[in-house]
Amino acid sequence: MGHTVALIGGGGIGRVHARHWQALPDVEVVAILDPRGHEARVAGDPPHFSDWDTMLGQTKPDIIDICTPTSLHREYIERAAASGKATFCEKPLARTLADCDAIVDVVRRSGIPFMVGHVVRFFPEFAAAKRLVDAGGIGSPVAVRVARMGGMPGQGRPENWYGSYAGSGGVILDLMLHDFDWLRWCFGDVQRVFAKGLYQQLEFEGQLDYALVTLRFKSGVVGHLTGSWAHPSGLKTSFEIAGDGGMIDQDSTRTTTLNVGRRNNIEEGDLPKVVIPRNPLAPLDDPYYQELGSFLEAIRNGTPSPVTVEDGREAVRIALAALESIETGKVVTL
Ligand SMILES: NC(=O)c1ccc[n+]([C@@H]2O[C@H](COP(=O)([O-])OP(=O)(O)OC[C@H]3O[C@@H](n4cnc5c(N)ncnc54)[C@H](O)[C@@H]3O)[C@@H](O)[C@H]2O)c1
């Protein structure tokens, strides 16, 4: 059975989604709702709308895909739920915990299929590391280090909502949130959070653009994360997971394999290496294609959402605890 999609917000990530929806089998993007009108052009060039009810009435989409600035996610999720539509929403679920709670409530009550765009779970290296940890490949995990560094997003756009801390939550809520979700997926719930942050002095005064966050998981694992919107060199990520039986090491700038070492390893051939598909990824390996495809499959098969509304809320809760820790200088217990 074919599915139709209405895209809400056709900016940076909306354009990426449209391209992958169009590539998925039996899917058509039938509407785009964006106040920028025809300036917000996306793949497939679907009809533009500026009014929700008109869009819904005329196109009757099966799926609503929300790619608006974060502070608007709640409003559109509520509208989609009231219409009983399967809904995909970009991360972060919302800017505040009050909005997250309202979203969890409305999604549960409406029973709509719902997924949050925690795409890092679909990046081959991050997904492979999770599989290895789950399979006991490094024994019991003890410590994990993650870095996610990039430039300030949204620069040069007419309306840069990223530059408003009240709107985006800065580097912690917008960028490091990716890793909070991935780590929670790998190691379970977080118990304590401590963070330090720097504020950019230049264009976006008061904007948090570099942060260190430490997490203590209920399982005992300790995480050390750095995130930056101050790196001029383009996005790069790295991580290292240490367990009592071995280590996993990944650095996006120097390797397309996941290096895995076992303690007391003597035989070179015994070192497992997980090969990560090369950049640029083949279209079907693209994490956004995989992510949207996994939601489609859940809708078509009536199976649980790959990333639930509760997962979305928990990632935001960790981010907000980190922001609180920076403000107070204290450890925050969840
Ligand atoms: N998963 C990822 O890798 C990823 C990457 C980038 C952004 N994001 C998230 O996606 C969301 C959008 O980010 P972006 O970079 O695309 O932002 P953007 O500023 O590039 O695009 C936002 C779009 O929303 C439109 N918009 C504004 N108000 C609207 C309204 N009331 N109704 C409908 N559309 C409206 C804007 O005109 C614009 O076209 C954010 O929540 C962001 O955190 C996720």
Image (cartoon, rainbow, N blue to C red):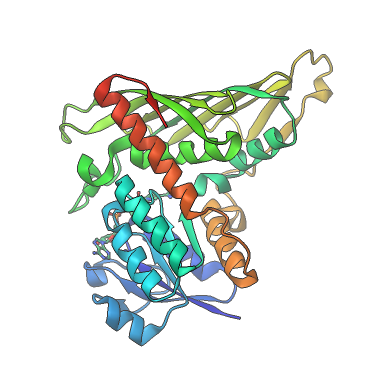
Q: Is residue 100 above or below residue 227?
A: below
Q: Is residue 260 above or below residue 110?
A: above
Residue 232, image quadrant? top left
Give x and y (percent) for residue 254. 56, 28
Position of 136 compared to 175: left or right?
right
The residue located at (30%, 31%) in the rendering is 323
Position of 43 compared to 285: left or right?
left
Q: Quadrant of the N terminus?
A: bottom right
Q: Quadrant of the C terminus?
A: top left
Q: In this orientation, does residue 161 appear?
A: yes
Residue found farthest to the bottom? 58
The residue located at (74%, 20%) in the rendering is 245
Give x and y (percent) for residue 258. 65, 32
Residue 293, image quadrant? bottom right
Q: Is residue 220 above or below residue 41?
A: above
Position of 270 compared to 83: left or right?
right
Image region (quadrant) for ligand 1:
bottom left
The residue located at (29%, 24%) in the rendering is 326
Give x and y (percent) for residue 138. 71, 25
Depth check: give the residue in front, 107 or 231: 107
Position of 107 compared to 142: left or right?
left
Q: Is residue 249 above or below residue 38?
A: above
Q: In this orientation, does residue 231 appear?
A: no
Depth check: give the residue in front, 321 or 261: 321
Give x and y (percent) for residue 257. 65, 34
The count of marks equals: 0
The residue located at (83%, 24%) in the rendering is 269
